[in-house]
Amino acid sequence: MRLLVVLLSVLLVVSGRPDPRPNLHGAQVLRVVPDASWQLHYLMALQMQGHYDFWTEPRAVGKPVDIMGTAFQLPALHAALTQLDLTPTVLISNVADLLAKSTPRNTEANRQMNWDDYQEYDVIQEWLESLASEYPSVCRVEDIGTSYEGRTLKLLTIGTGAEDNPGIFIDGGIHAREWISPATVTYMINQLVTNSEMYSELLSTINFYIMPSINPDGYAYTWSDDRLWRKTRSETDSSLGCKGADPNRNWGFHWNEVGASSNPCSDIYAGPSPFSEVEMQLVRDEISKRASTLKAYLTFHSYSQLWMYPWGWTSDLPDDWKDLDDLAQTAVDALTAVHGTQYEIGSSTNTIYAAAGGSDDWAKGVAGVKYSYTIELRDTGLFGFLLPPSLIIPTGEETFEGVKEVGYFIARTYGK
Ligand code: 0X9
Ligand code: ZN
C-alpha cells in the first residue's frame, strides 16, 4: 500500500498535474440506436435522471446515442439498455486510456502556440496578443471583460477595410470539453492573419470578429480537474453544490422552453435566468454592438459533423431557411472536398434535437444576423470529445475551406 502511495506521488510530480477525473478508469462509451419511438423516449428519460454522461443526446429514431458509464455504473447501464431492448456497441472501451493518449504533453515547448497539440487558455491568450502586435495592419485585439473566475476574454478583429464593412462573428469553446473547437478556431485565425496576402480582397471587404474560447473557466477546469466538464463554473446554487450553467442554454431567446433543465446539477442547466452567465453577457454585447453590420454568426462545437442553422427552439424553419441551407451546402461541399469528411446539414431541431437558449437562435432571432450556424466538428464518435491531437490540423484545414466559402459569399453579396 505504502509503495502504491509513493508511486502515485512520484507519478504526480513527474507529470506535473493530477490525473483528471481518475474514476474514468474502466469507463466506457456505449452506442445504441433506438429503432422505435418508445425506446427514444425512455432514453430521454434515462438522460433526465442525470446518472450518466450522455456524450450525444437522444435525437431521433435511427440516430445513434452515445452514453458514458463509469466502471461502477456499467452493469446498471447495460441492464437499463437491455430493458429497453437495445443492444449497445462499445464505442470507447476504456475512456481513461483514450484520455491518456489525447492529453497534451505538458512541456515548456508546448506552451508555444501550435496545432500539433491542444493549448491551455493562457497560451491562446498570449498568442492572440502576439499576433496583434506582429500583424497590426491585419488584426487587432481587445479585452472585452472578465469571466466569473476572473479570466480575461479577448476579441480579435481581422480586416483591412472599413469598420462598417459586412462582418462575420465566430466563437469557439462555448462547451468546455469540446477541445477541437478552440483548436480549429485558432487554426483559422492563424491562416487568415499569417497568410493575409492570399486573402487581401476578402479582408478588405469584410471583417471577422473572433473569440476562440468563450467559456474560459470551464475550459481551464477541463485541464485541471475534469476533462469532460461542459458548463461554466459559476456558483448558481449553493444548496446542491453543483456548479455552472450550460452556456448554450443560457441565451435570452425562448430561454428554457425546451431541451434544457432547471436542475443546477444537470449538464443542460439553463441557468437561474437568461444571460445569468457573465461570459455569455459579454459575447452577447459584442454581437449586439455590431449587429447592423454582422451578416453571419458561426459557433463551433463538437462532435457529430453537422452544419446546422436555426431554429433550435422549434421544429419550424425560419422563412429564409433556403438561403441558409444553400450557403451551408456550399460550405460543406468545400469542407468535404479536402479530406472527404461527411457532414449533415439542416435546422438544429430537425437534425439533432430541440434545445432552446442557444447562441445561434439568439443571433438570428434577436440580433438579426441572417446566416447563423452551429457547426459540430469531428468526429462521429470514434473518439468523441477525446479527438487525438493529430486530427487538429486536418480538422482545421477542412473547416477553414468551409468558412472561407461563407466569407466569399458574404463579401460578394454584401461587400461595398
Ligand atoms: O446541445 C447543444 O448545445 C449543441 N450540441 S452539443 O453536443 N455540442 O452540446 C447543439 C446546439 C444547436 N443549437 C440550438 N439548439 N440552438
Ligand atoms: Zn457543444
Image (cartoon, grey):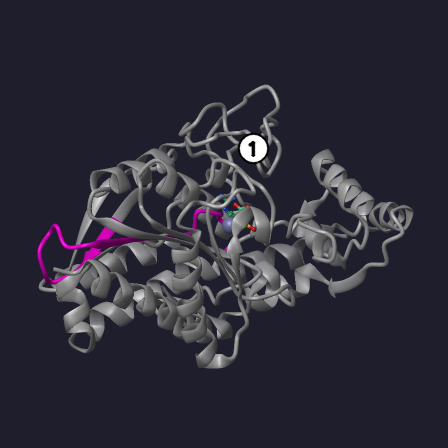
Residue 398 to residue 411: above or below:
below
Q: Under tag 1, what secondary structure?
A: loop
Q: Is residue 398 left or right of residue 265?
A: left
Q: Position of residue 318 (x, y in %)?
A: 44, 45
Kind of residue indicated by mark 1: Tyr
Q: Quadrant of the C terminus?
A: bottom left
Q: Is residue 392 visible?
A: yes
**Which residue lies at the image location 82% right of the left edge and 59% below the top edge?**
88
Q: Residues within 10 Å of mark 1 (few under 14, many from 20)?
A: many
Task: Write down the quadrant of residue 64 in the picture.
Answer: bottom right
Task: Write down the quadrant of residue 95 in the picture.
Answer: bottom right
**Which residue lies at the image location 45% right of the left edge and 48% below the top edge?**
219
Q: Position of residue 221 (x, y in %)?
A: 49, 45
**Which residue lies at the image location 31% right of the left edge and 69% below the top edge?**
404
Foreground of the two, 304 or 269: 304
Query: Which residue lies most toward the top here?
Result: 239
**Which residue lies at the image location 46% right of the left edge and 24% below the top edge?**
273
Q: Position of residue 238 (x, y in %)?
A: 55, 21
Give the magenta range.
155-178
* Disc 1 target residue: 269
Q: Position of residue 76 (x, y in %)?
A: 86, 45
Query: Magenta stretch: residue 173 in it?
Result: yes
Foreground of the two, 152 or 362: 362
Q: Is residue 130 left or right of residue 351?
A: left
Q: Is residue 228 visible?
A: no
